[in-house]
Image (cartoon, grey):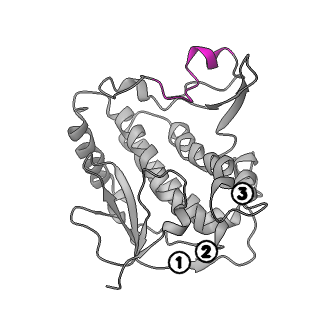
Amino acid sequence: MSAARSLEHLHGNLLPKFPPSRIGGEPPAGAVPGRALAEAEALRGVIGRYAERAGYGQHDFSAVASEWSKHYFIVLLLPVVAANIIEDRELPTAFDSFHVELGEDQLPLRLWFEGEGAPLGDTGVPARFQAVLAHLERLIEGLCGLSRFSSKVFWNNAGNVFELFSSQIHRHPLARPGLGDPVRDMVARRRFPDGRPNPLYEPVRYLTDPQGKARRVRKLCCFRYFLPHLTGPSYCGSCPLKAENKLRLPVGYGCDG
């Protein structure tokens, strides 16, 4: 197998707690083949090992799956979206084309891609995101099969990451004017050209507090508060169920399990 090449230049200074993904090289022991995520029982095992390590064995598996998915979507989308908009390159997201390296807590840490991917060429939105959307659709279908949550919860977890790029990409060392436009366009589209609803549409809102500061709020709760052993507050900072957010949100925001 070829020597590993770091994708540090794509990660830049975004989400520094996640180490850069790699292309080539030998994944570390314990890394999960991507194809396992497309198989129901294997996916259950991956999430179950995280639940055991975190002490969630007796708690709601659906909430555990949601928490796991948030980490996975960051690990997937950070390099994939960055390559897409910075290099006009589509990293390989087929389930047999990468491994997932796990941290000591059994949460996704980074991806090891087997290939460089392919140039996107002159591709507009949403076509340029077609491959990763297909990946998300299949994975979310599997997550829904293992949980009692609707697909909207998992799509909002993914959309939250998409939108985060659009709001933070200006901080990237390789940022240039208009770099984040394809991502902003993606989350602003209510429907695809063929009329299908866009599951990534408007995943967050920005509310203005009494001091005039904008506050970022997710469209749907991720049910983090179902996991009592998490350190820190029960609700994440952008939770729509927090009292200061709940009264100021439009209809359709909040909780849809």
Please name the predominant secondary structure of the magenta segment in the image.
loop
The one nearer the camera, 142 or 154, is: 154
Question: Reading the chain from its start, which is encountered first: label 1 or label 3?
Answer: 1
Residue pointed to by mark 1: 117
Mark in front: 1 vs 3:
3
Please tell me how crowded label 2 is: few (under 14), some (14-19), or many (20+) other residues with Cα within 10 Å: some
- Decide if residue 219 is on the left or right side of residue 15: right
Residue pointed to by mark 2: 89
Please tell me how crowded label 3 is: few (under 14), some (14-19), or many (20+) other residues with Cα within 10 Å: many
In the rendered structure, which amino acid carries the disc numbered 2? Arg
Mark in front: 2 vs 3:
3
The one nearer the camera, 256 or 226, is: 226
Where residue 103 appears, x then y in whole percent? 29, 52
Helix or strand or loop: what does disc 2 sit on?
strand
Helix or strand or loop: what does disc 3 sit on?
loop
Q: Looking at the figure, which quarter contains the N terminus?
A: bottom left
Residue pointed to by mark 3: 180
In the rendered structure, which amino acid carries the disc numbered 3? Gly
Q: In this view, does 165 lie above or below 129?
A: above
Please tell me how crowded label 1 is: few (under 14), some (14-19), or many (20+) other residues with Cα within 10 Å: some
Q: Is residue 185 above or below residue 30?
A: above
Where residue 219 appears, x then y in whole percent? 62, 32
In the rendered structure, which amino acid carries the disc numbered 1? Gly
Question: Reading the chain from its start, which is encountered first: label 2 or label 3?
Answer: 2
Helix or strand or loop: what does disc 1 sit on?
loop
Q: Can residue 199 be seen in this view?
A: no
Q: What stretch is highlighted in magenta?
A: 235-247
Q: Do tag 1 and tag 2 residues touch (Cβ < 8 Å)? A: yes
Q: Is residue 111 magenta?
A: no
Where residue 134 appears, x then y in whole percent? 55, 61
